[in-house]
Image (cartoon, grey):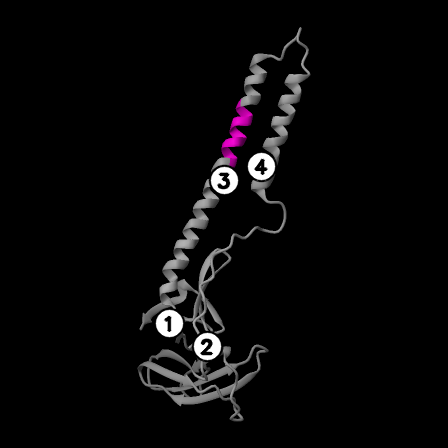
């Protein structure tokens, strides 16, 4: 198994103006205007002290906001780094998680589902284009069931490792099929941060760490 390196978190900035940069720019502009005002005031008619004090208070308030935002941003980055380091302990272990996709790793992928009774069940696998490439019909037992895909399509052709969409439908004959919730099992190969959320990689499938239900060695 190839183990992917842990990717350090990177800060993401929404499209448009950076609020912190804008706030800092406003503070600098305010300071320049204040200094210019002091340099060009009439010595015989100096600025009213009340007005001058109010402007200084505004300046201090803006500066404080900049410092607070900078501190909060640093705390967020530190927390993300710590979360990634903790999540990196998953690498190399087998995890069970909720997902609508199965991870085909080394030509194999597994799911687990719970059926209310012994009934016909159809498991379908679709590619990235949404086309069904494999389908399996089985009879479930009441309670926990598992199904493993060998990575072959309906023509017996081996598919490349990757993420494939899975649906599990059950129900007695003559009734409308009902979707059965399932979990997937795969080997954790890496941990990354995307959109300020820690994600675990199962081969080419990426899932939020919060989707993991269990971990085994």
Query: Are dots 1 and 2 in contact, CB under 8 Å?
Result: no
Q: Nearer the viewer, mark 1 or mark 2?
A: 1
SS of the residue under disc 3: helix
Provide the residue span drawn in magenta: 57-66
Q: Main secondary structure of the magenta part?
A: helix
Q: Give the spatial CA distance, label 2 vs label 4.
A: 45 Å
Image quarter (top left, top right, bottom left or bottom right) of the N terminus = bottom left
The CA span between labels 4 and 3 is 10 Å
Residue 193: x and y in percent read 47, 59
Q: Nearer the viewer, mark 4 or mark 1?
A: 1
- The answer to which of 27 and 163 lies nearer the viewer is 27
Image quadrant containing the C terminus? bottom left
Q: Earlier in the sequence, mark 2 or mark 4?
A: 4
Residue on which the image places disc 2 = 103
Which comes sooner in the sequence, label 1 or label 2? Answer: 1
Element under label 4?
helix
Numbered disc 2: secondary structure: strand
* Residue identifier under label 1: 92
Q: Which residue is mark 4?
A: 23
Query: Percent from the top left, x then y, of residue 198?
Result: 44, 60
Q: Is residue 89 above or below residue 62?
A: below
Q: Nearer the viewer, residue 14 or 37?
A: 37
Q: Secondary structure at mark 1?
A: loop
Quote the CA–CA distance across marks 4 and 1.
Answer: 45 Å
Q: Label 3: few (<14), some or many (≥20) within 10 Å? A: some
Residue 190's spot in the image, x, y percent? 44, 68
Tally of numbered tags: 4
Query: Which residue is the site of mark 3?
Result: 69
Give how far apart the Cα atoms at labels 2 and 3 are.
40 Å
Q: Is residue 186 left or right of residue 129?
A: left
């Amino acid at each position: 198994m190839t183990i992917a390196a842990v990717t350090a978190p990177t800060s993401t900035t929404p499209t448009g103006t950076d609020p912190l940069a804008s706030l800092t720019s406003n503070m600098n502009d305010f300071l320049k205007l204040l200094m210019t005002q002091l340099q060009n005031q009439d010595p015989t008619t100096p600025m009213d002290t009340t007005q001058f004090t109010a402007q200084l208070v505004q300046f201090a308030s803006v500066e404080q906001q900049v410092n607070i935002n900078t501190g909060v941003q640093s705390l967020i980055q530190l927390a993300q780094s710590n979360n990634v380091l903790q999540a990196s302990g998953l690498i190399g272990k087998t995890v069970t998680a909720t997902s609508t996709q199965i991870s085909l790793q080394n030509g194999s992928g597994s799911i687990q589902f719970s059926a209310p009774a012994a009934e016909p069940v159809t498991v379908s696998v679709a590619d990235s284009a949404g086309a069904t490439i494999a389908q399996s019909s089985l009879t479930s037992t009441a309670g926990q069931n598992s199904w493993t895909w060998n990575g072959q399509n309906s023509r017996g052709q081996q598919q490349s490792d990757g993420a494939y969409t899975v649906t599990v439908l059950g129900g007695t004959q003559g009734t409308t099929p009902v979707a059965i919730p399932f979990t997937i099992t795969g080997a954790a190969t890496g941990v990354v941060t995307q959109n300020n959320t820690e994600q675990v990689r199962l081969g080419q499938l990426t899932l939020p760490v919060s989707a993991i239900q269990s971990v085994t060695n």
